[in-house]
Amino acid sequence: MGANLSCLEERIGLLASWMHAAKHLVVFTGAGISTESGLHDFRGPDGIWTRREKGLPTPSQDFASAKPNAGHLAIVELQSLGKLAFLISQNVDNLHLRSGIRPELLAELHGNLTKVRCTGCEFRMDRMEGEDICPLCGGRLVSTVVNFGDPLPARDLAEAYFHSRRSDLFIVCGSSLVVYPAADMPRVALDAGARLVIINQGETPLDRAAHLRFYERIGEVFPRAVARLKELMAGKAG
């Protein structure tokens, strides 16, 4: 189903043209977008689950030292250009918010290490040392991070489904698309008629359904595609 283009520059140009034409562009990110910030993914060649399955030790994650990389910043550039309708992320590392993504354009399906929520009124706030009582209702504050078996945050999940259904271009960056219900989103977008683009070094269950597939690093692809998009937009403006 994917475009039969062998040249990376041709594929980047096609992605830029699709972004230019898109009316409701949605980006979906997984742990793979943060590997260029020094964090490990889960199912990549040296991912955390991959290493565990091989009986190898799993390295600790230094979230505090990690900084947004070129992939994160390219998504922010889409936001600045007015082309980003919504961003759905499986990541808990806070790098999207640190990069400058507006909170109202972001659904963090698996939570955020730096945030807590109230079990009573669902109020969210930055994690503060020793703070365990909600300032609004007096309820208990807990981490927003979703553990295995926990339900996903209802508001984020509803927004993710809403924007996936509305999307005409759905771009996956750095996800193996095997963790549900988050991995439902590109399927929902496809069913709604969206073009699906996957940028991921490992294989995914939706590779054959993708209209455009990149196995290169996100940093090799997405910043260059956004730069080409800016050229297209400048040409239209001119």
Image (spheres, grey):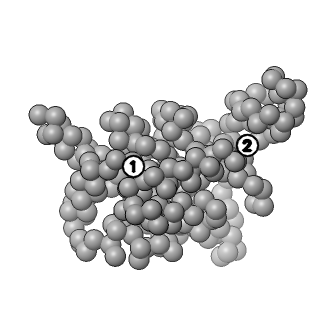
Residue 77 against residue 1 in the figure, above or below: above
Q: Return the x and y of residue 176 as percentages of the image width and height.
A: 53, 66
* Residue 62 shows in this picture: no
Q: Nearer the viewer, residue 212 or 199?
A: 212
| In the image: residue 70, left or right of residue 151 | left
Q: Residue at x 16, y 34 (%)?
A: 237
Q: Which residue position holds label 2? A: 144
Q: Residue at x 63, y 51 (%)?
A: 157
Q: Which residue position holds label 1? A: 25
Give the farthest residue toward the top.
Answer: 135
Q: Return the x and y of residue 64 as percentages of the image width and height.
A: 62, 38
| Dot placed on the residue nearer the N-terminal end, 2 or 1 | 1
Q: Residue at x 23, y 53 (%)?
A: 17
Q: Residue at x 80, y 34 (%)?
A: 121
* Residue 161 shows in this picture: yes
Element assignment for label 2: loop
Mark pair 2, 1: CA separation = 27 Å
Element assignment for label 1: strand
Q: Amino acid at mark 1?
A: Leu
Q: Are marks 2 and 1 in contact (CB under 8 Å)?
A: no
Badge 1: few (under 14), some or many (20 or more) residues near its Cα, within 10 Å?
A: many
